[in-house]
Amino acid sequence: FFFEFSEISFWCIIVMAPKKPEKVKKPQKQIELKLSHILCKDEKRLSDLYQLWTTNYLDKGEAVPLDVFAACAGQLSECPSGKKKGQLGWITKGKLEDAVENTVFSMQKGTISYVLKGSRGYHIFYLEDSREKK
């Protein structure tokens, strides 16, 4: 293109850059957790249990054994899963209430959560395993 402004003339070259290709978003891999839990309406009952586990295991750098957790879940949990020793099976994000989901999905395999308040009462979760959803 040629432009003329008063006494100054110049050429302007317009370069058309090729359109950048849109980045294809890779689908995020969905993680599922194999969880067990104990549910009680009485916060003190779970807090006392957590304190016992802290003294006997956690303070010594040990994990709470799954069989110990399962036995307690079978005796104490007020959830129907108590009959299955607290086992909830494989859970994906969006299946738990927001109040507990962030904590549970940040846990490490073989660990327990602290006492968490949910809409149905108080929970302690045990993360048995995690995997990419099939």
Image: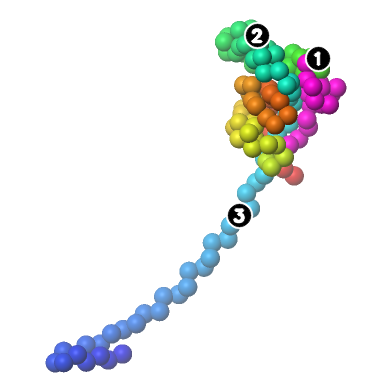
Q: Callout 1, which amino acid?
A: Gln
Does residue 79 belong to the magenta stretch? yes
Read off the residue under disc 1: 75
Q: Callout 2, which amino acid?
A: Leu
Nearer to us in this view, 31 or 92: 92
* Residue shown at the point (40%, 79%) measured from the top left: 16
User: Quick check: 69 left or right of 19?
Assistant: right
Q: Callout 3, which amino acid?
A: Lys
Read off the residue under disc 3: 26
Q: Helix or strand or loop: what does disc 2 sit on?
A: helix
* Residue shown at the point (61%, 31%) measured from the top left: 103
Mark 3 Cα within 10 Å, few/some/many (few <14, many 20+)?
few
User: Quick check: 11 left or right of 120?
Assistant: left
Read off the residue under disc 2: 52
Residue 131 visible from this viewpoint = no
In the rendered view, would you say 98 is above or below 17? above
Q: Helix or strand or loop: what does disc 1 sit on?
A: helix
Quarter of the image where one finds residue 126:
top right
User: Quick check: 21 left or right of 104?
Assistant: left
x and y, in percent, of residue 22 in the image:
53, 65
* Residue shown at the point (58%, 57%) measured from the top left: 25
* Residue shown at the point (71%, 18%) measured from the top left: 42
Does residue 84 belong to the magenta stretch? yes
Mark 1 Cα within 10 Å, few/some/many (few <14, many 20+)?
few
In the rendered structure, which disc, 1 or 2, sits on the residue that comes first in sequence?
A: 2
In the rendered structure, which disc, 1 or 3, sits on the residue that comes first in sequence?
A: 3
Residue 19 visible from this viewpoint = yes
Please provide the residue range marked out in magenta. Answer: 76-91
Q: Helix or strand or loop: what does disc 3 sit on?
A: loop
In the rendered view, would you say 109 is above or below 48? below
Distance between mark 2 and mark 3 Cα atoms: 45 Å
Task: Tell me the mark number nearer the camera, choosing from 1 and 3.
Answer: 1
